[in-house]
């Protein structure tokens, strides 16, 4: 993106949140001599994409694969990361009915695991779905997937995982989730990828990705360092508690201290909290009450001196297990493991605030994770050393089938507030990956720097850019 570097701007900008979206905006604005204060409720940069020290190693909050085909995002990522990254060959599988299926699918492995009769069942149901297709309304996740893969493959490869993730039946889930994440993927394309390998890639199936040498959070720590070393402030342990807009300015209150005046606010805080802080009209507040987020519990497990499996992560589709995904940090890049013989795994449990598991003790959660790991036979009892729990609230915006009806009045209300830009994963209620949040930050900054008018609400994670690029071991490839 062309950025006008000559312009000095006197406007004061407040950014709420030092995650990928907020820091990308702060970085670009700082580069362009804008006055920016970033408020962050926690004591670290990176938000959900942070990296932490654990047992003298480094771990992310679950698997954090970065991938983008947008040159604007890739260029920014490379500008920050420089040469401090390695290419990771993706190895991921699905655990279902005590068997491991390669993902992306390898036809022979799938055939062997499913068996001949189940494979025929899948094929028949696929062709039946193709015959029915004309009459199908694919506005739910279930209909969308059945439309493309057939009912049986939906039941095996999509249903249980998605229901664990969202806590909803697939028939209650909006097709936006599928459209944004597995858009254009069909059985034919998945098989084509399996056969042609590197010559054909759907975004969901990318087999190699660039990963920072010191963990995903390295990107955001460097952005934060640049911002504070170049005249702007990142204020940690500062939660924004209210935002009042008066005469085209904003008065922000943080931790009940005095109010501070800003010309512009870029918010990445949960959209539902923002609505409450803004004192919005009743109908907008009611709409916000209908938008829900799902939480994640991460249970980190330290194992003694072993390499339990070669995958970076494994999707757990088996219904008898509550965990949905297991990450093995030993299989990312050597630096994060710091040459230790111990292995750190991370099991993810998704839940709502009111679910019993969300309030369980750490001891309970660690013993649950241990029991589930033993069930998979990936580890044995003697390898277990200890466990640690991290709870992340509000990390998945739930695309319940009517969520857009509730989001629309909120978008209309927020769009009318002069110089309030709303971006980020929970900030804008979009199922963003890092790349989408980085792009939102970049475009929000561009709107302010160059008086551009990118419609940030229209930026879904299925957006396509006219140019395409990818990061390789030697830099950006167009
Ligand atoms: C388990 C898991 C796995 C993931 N895997 C991947 C992956 O493989 N690849 C990928 O690209 N992405 C992945 N993601 C998503 C990625 O983490 C997010 O897309 C990204 O972090 C979103 O950035 P953000 O800036 O929009 O939001 P966040 O990272 O949530 O940052 C928002 C920040 O705002 C702060 N904040 C909130 N309210 C306030 C307030 N009132 N005042 C001040 N500060 C506030 C928060 O503390 C937070 O730091 C994963 C996420 C999870 C949870």
Image (spheres, rainbow, N blue to C red):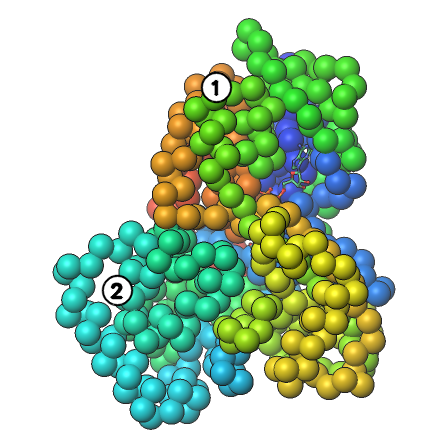
| 87, above or below 308, in the image | above
Estimate the x, y position of residue 394 in percent, counting from the top left: 59, 46
Does the rendering let one see residue 424?
A: yes
Q: Quadrant of residue 299?
A: bottom right
Q: Nearer the viewer, residue 356 or 318?
A: 356
The residue to which callout 2 is attached is: 147
Give me the residue at 54% from left, 34% from top: 271
Give me the residue at 78% from left, 72% from top: 302
Crowding around mark 2 (Cα neighbors within 10 Å: few <14, some 14 to 19, many 20+) is many
Q: Is mark 1 within 8 Å of ligand 1?
A: no
Q: Residue furthest top?
A: 247
Q: Secondary structure at mark 1?
A: loop
Tell whether 378 sits left or right of 471: right
Q: Quadrant of residue 34?
A: top right
* Mark 2 to mark 1 CA distance (whole Å): 40 Å
Estimate the x, y position of residue 165 in percent, counting from the top left: 51, 60
| 214, above or below 437, in the image | below
Q: How many marks?
A: 2
Give me the residue at 76% from left, 59% from top: 361
Give me the residue at 47% from left, 21% from top: 282
Q: Nearer the viewer, residue 441 or 82?
A: 441
Q: Earlier in the sequence, mark 2 or mark 1?
A: 2
The residue to which callout 1 is attached is: 281
Estimate the x, y position of residue 55 in percent, counting from the top left: 84, 65
Q: Is mark 2 within 8 Å of ligand 1?
A: no
């Amino acid at each position: 993106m062309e950025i006008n570097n000559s312009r000095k701007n006197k406007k004061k900008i407040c950014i709420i949140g030092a995650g990928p979206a907020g820091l990308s905006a702060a970085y670009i604005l700082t580069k362009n001599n804008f006055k920016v204060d970033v408020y962050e409720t926690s004591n670290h940069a990176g938000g959900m994409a942070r990296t932490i020290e654990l047992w003298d190693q480094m771990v992310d909050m679950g698997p954090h694969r970065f991938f983008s085909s947008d040159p604007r995002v890739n260029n920014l990522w490379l500008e920050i990361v420089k040469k401090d990254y390695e290419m990771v060959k993706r190895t991921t599988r699905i655990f279902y009915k005590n068997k491991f299926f390669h993902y992306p699918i390898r036809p022979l492995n799938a055939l062997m695991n499913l068996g001949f009769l189940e494979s025929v069942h899948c094929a028949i149901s696929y062709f039946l779905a193709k015959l029915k297709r004309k009459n199908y309304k694919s506005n739910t996740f279930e209909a969308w997937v059945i439309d493309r893969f057939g009912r049986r493959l939906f039941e095996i490869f999509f249903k249980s995982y998605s229901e664990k993730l969202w806590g909803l039946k697939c028939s209650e889930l909006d097709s936006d989730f599928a459209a944004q994440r597995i858009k254009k993927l069909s059985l034919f394309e998945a098989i084509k990828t399996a056969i042609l390998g590197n010559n054909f890639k759907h975004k969901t199936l990318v087999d190699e990705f660039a990963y920072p040498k010191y963990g995903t959070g390295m990107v955001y720590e460097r952005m934060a360092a640049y911002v504070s070393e170049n005249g702007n402030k990142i204020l940690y342990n500062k939660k924004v508690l209210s935002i009042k807009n008066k005469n085209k300015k904003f008065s922000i209150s943080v931790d009940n201290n005095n109010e501070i005046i800003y010309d512009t606010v870029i918010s990445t805080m949960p959209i539902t909290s923002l609505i409450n802080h803004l004192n919005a009209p009743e109908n907008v507040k009611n709409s916000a009450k209908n938008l829900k987020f799902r939480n994640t519990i991460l249970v980190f497990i330290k194992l003694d001196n072993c390499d339990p499996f070669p995958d970076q992560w494994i999707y757990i589709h088996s219904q008898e297990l509550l965990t949905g995904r297991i990450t093995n940090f030993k299989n990312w890049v050597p630096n994060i493991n710091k040459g230790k013989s111990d292995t750190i795994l991370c099991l993810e449990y998704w839940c709502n605030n009111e679910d019993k598991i969300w309030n369980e003790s750490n001891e309970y959660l660690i013993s649950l994770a241990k029991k589930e790991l033993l069930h998979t036979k990936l580890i044995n009892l003697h390898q277990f050393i200890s466990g640690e729990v991290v709870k992340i609230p509000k990390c998945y915006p739930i695309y319940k089938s009517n969520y857009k009806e509730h989001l629309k009045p909120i978008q209309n209300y927020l769009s009318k507030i002069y110089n309030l830009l709303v971006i980020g994963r929970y900030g804008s209620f979009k199922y963003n990956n890092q790349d989408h949040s980085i792009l939102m930050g970049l475009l929000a900054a561009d709107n302010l720097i160059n008086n551009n008018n990118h419609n940030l609400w229209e930026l879904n994670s299925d957006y396509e850019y006219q140019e395409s690029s990818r990061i390789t071991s030697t830099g950006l490839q167009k």
